[in-house]
Amino acid sequence: MGEYLLELQDLKTYFKVKAGKVRAVDGVSFAIKPGEKLGVVGESGCGKSVTALSIMRLLPHPPAENAGGSVLFEDQDLLDLPESAMRKIRGGKIGMIFQDPMTCLNPTMTVGKQIGEALGIHLNLSKDEGLKRAAALLEQVGIPAAAERINSYPHQFSGGMRQRVMIAIALACNPKLLIADEPTTALDVTVQAQILELINGVCSDFGTAVMLITHDLGVVAGMTDRVVVMYAGKVVETAPTDELFVNPSHPYTLGLLASVPRLDEERHSQLKTIEGAPPDLLKPPPGCPFMPRCAFAHPICRTMPPLDPVAGNAAHFKACWVDVNDPNEQAYAERRRQARIDKMLAATNGKAATTLTAAEEK
Amino acid sequence: MDISDRLKITAVEDIEPVLELTPELVQKRRSQGRIIFDRFIRNRAAIVGAIALILLCLLCFLGPLVWRADPNVINVTTVSSSFSPPSLQHPFGTDDVGRDEFARVMAGGRVSLLIGLTSMLMAIIFGIGIGAFAGYYGGIVDNLLMRFTDVVLAVPLYLLLFVLSASFTDHTPKSVIILIAVLTWTYAARLVRGEFLALKEREFVLSARTIGARNLRMMFRHILPNAAGPIIVNATLLIGGNIILESVMSYFGFGIQPPDASWGSLISDGQGFFDVGPWLVLAPGLLIFLTVLSFNLVGDGLRDALDPYMTER
């Protein structure tokens, strides 16, 4: 086996719709080592979830189609596997948990049966053995009186407990990789921390690698070893977590970090945002997808930059032509930002002026 | 006693809990079945229907053990033995050839209830199969199965029933059951397909796929139980409908043949003598009415009890 547990190479997933092809995942490459915790961040609609579902081959075909690339899991391309072999991977080798635990559990089955089901499918355990293991797993994910609770139905559990059950199901067969697709978005803040702690702890115990999809940079900082930043279906930067927070090298990452609200911020000050909206993936702009929103943009950005190592850290890659730490570039970006603001102000003032004159004429 | 004395903790009290958490004190959790049962119990009409049904079944299936008159024995020894009005000796009177109508109604009821129940079971199972595959797989499978269903639905039901029973059945209860089932699975199939179409998009189905479940497991272990409510309601209502269908068939002479009886054939036999023995029509007619009404009441009660969005009152 190679160095990596999971390796995506130039993965492309398109959705065929009437208007054309939506390039939801457009040439994504990254890798996860055994036991490693990888965070995938990016704003809504940038292809994070589609990447995860493509790995598991859970997208409906059509409209989704695999347009190239490969998903190497233990040196085996998952995209080439027959459906029956893929079923063995799902749940057996790769577990997955979703955003909303309220809807992900079958309301007509007891939680014990639902945990035992995975064991029955992959380890051929009998119902009784399955239930016994289910109780042990439930105990492990921190549900008290597990032996009694396995006979409860999901509606008798709270949101946090249901997510614990989901984790127990995903980890039941001791998979090599856990894909957690925004596992805490639907939960209370206090419960979020517990669930993350649990995922972290249980996966460390089992030696399970984690692919954590989130748009919460705080979560990433707290529990991942490495981060992949995605934008418009592409990887724009990847680095060890500490390195990324200390030395962000892509304008988009800079923007993401700047828009995290801070406790020491002045009260009532406006939250910082990244100007504009992500591009329409039906017809992405040529070259770097972030160019239209980027203050650092140069004419060269009309061609897509390769994902190249950043000087100073061999594990840090970025897809950007510009060195954002260069003071000249920073001054250039500042000038462009100011120019944009001036232009906007002029536009609004001009509009106000014309309405004024129109009113006067009346 | 001084308060400080009362608060003084002895070594023994320190260990012994003040109040033991006995099973009676532990919070009770009602099971899903219990919740549904409680909700059903609270529906008066449904309870009346259920009790009526139990009594009717007892009457038809256990009644003959008590009321030992033979439904097929002809008694024309005296003039008064035919068309004798209801009396203690013959609670529902006698018919034109002096047979005990009470015994005949019980025998007919057995046939009618049996046909209603078993044809419903067959129709529902067939309907679930067709509907599940159509709804789950969609696309061309759905189109083929549903167009087939439409074809069956498009032919006038009674016409088909009469033509087929005249040419293909031997008028035994078994053949009538199969015939009715073959013609009434369509609504169940449409219902199940609709449920599957909606339920297969739910997230718990996706999460079942992430643990490597096969299609059949997903269809029958995960989706079908979630569609159980509407299916059960439909099944209950279908029994009533099928009893009527059987009665109509027998009334027109296509179903059960003499000397065997069903409620429909009893009405058919008795209608010629409505002026001399109205009980011959009224007894089986009222029983059909009662049975179908009861099944419908129970069905309505189940619909309310199984609806997860019904709020507790």
Image: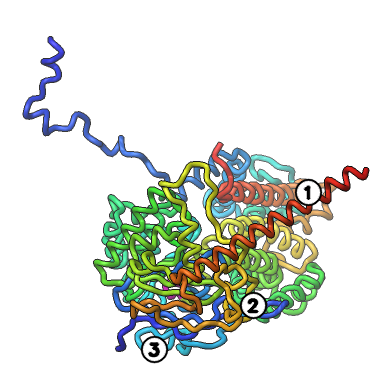
Q: Is residue A232 left or right of residue A181?
A: right
Quickly name the residue at label 3.
Answer: A76
Q: Callout 3: residue from which chain?
A: A
**Percent x, y for residue B8?**
11, 20
Residues at marks 1 and 3 touching, judged by CB atoms closer than 8 Å: no
Quickly name the residue at label 2.
Answer: A285
- Looking at the rendered structure, the secondary structure element under dot 2 is loop
Whether B212 is among the magenta residues is yes
Amino acid type at mark 2: Pro
Residue displayed at 63% across by 51% down:
B299
**Percent x, y for residue A264?**
41, 46
Pair 1/3: label in front: 1
Count of numbered labels shown in the rendering: 3
Around disc 3, counting alpha carbons within 10 Å, would you say few (fewer than 14), some (14 to 19), or many (20 or more)?
some
Residue displayed at 47% across by 44% down:
A266
| Residue at the top extreme, as displayed | B1
Whether A261 is among the magenta residues is no
Pair 1/2: label in front: 1
Around disc 2, counting alpha carbons within 10 Å, would you say few (fewer than 14), some (14 to 19), or many (20 or more)?
some
Q: Callout 1: residue from which chain?
A: A
Above or below: residue B105 compared with residue A308: above
| Residue at the right extreme, as displayed | A362
Amino acid type at mark 1: Ala
Q: Which residues are magenta?
A: B208-213
Pair 2/3: label in front: 2
Quickly name the residue at label 1.
Answer: A352
